[in-house]
Image (cartoon, helix red, strand yellow):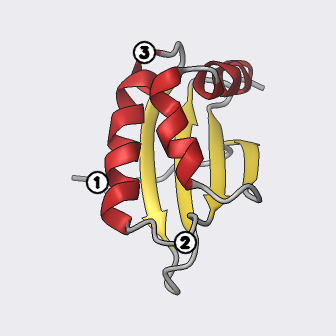
Amino acid sequence: MNTTAIELVIFKTKPNVSPEILKEAIHKTTPVLAQIDGFLDRELSLTETGEEWVDIVHWKNMELAKKAVDIFMNTPECQELVSLMQESYSMRHLNSMLYAKKNQ
């Protein structure tokens, strides 16, 4: 099966990290992701409680998604973002089975 892959990262920030600081760090990492083979798009969300962030990245396929993790974690421009996150976070890779979009 040849499907796109979703990287889903759910995390909390360290104390005293404002949403503005986090969003700035995310903006710095997006160009890095864009240069990695297979990157499609990215969305950052905040849970209703404001306690957890959800970073959703779409990749061309699962193999490229998994390779991207090592590249991201070893790129100096991404270390600021990693340093803002609490150590306990959840990362999952999922095969996209359906993508629906409202007609425009």
Real-space Cα distance between discs 3 and 2? 31 Å
Residue type at the position of mark 3: Gln
User: Where does the N terminus fall, quadrant-wise?
Assistant: top right
Q: Nearer the viewer, residue 86 or 31?
A: 86
User: Which residue position is annotated with label 2?
Assistant: 15
Residue contact at pointers 1 and 2, CB within 8 angstroms: no
Q: CA distance from mark 1 to mark 3?
A: 29 Å
Q: Nearer the viewer, residue 81 or 57?
A: 81
Report how far apart the C-alphas of labels 1 and 2 lie in the structure.
41 Å
Q: Which residue is mark 1?
A: 103
Residue at the (73%, 57%) spot, across then down:
89
> Which x, y percent locates residue 10?
65, 60
Residue shown at 28%/54% (left/top)?
A: 103
- Of all residues, the one furthest to the front in this rendering is 16
| SS type, badge 1 | loop
Q: Nearer the viewer, residue 104 or 23?
A: 23
Read off the residue under disc 3: 35
Q: Are marks 3 and 2 in contact (CB under 8 Å)?
A: no
Task: Find numbered disc 3 in the image and state the secondary structure of the residue it sits on.
Answer: helix
Viewer-side label of 1, 3:
3
Kind of residue sitting beneath label 2: Pro
Q: Position of residue 94 (x, y in %)?
A: 73, 44
Q: What's the residue type where badge 1 is placed?
A: Asn
Where in the figure is residue 6, as x and y percent of width and height?
63, 41
SS state under label 2 = loop
Q: Is residue 91 above or below residue 69?
A: below
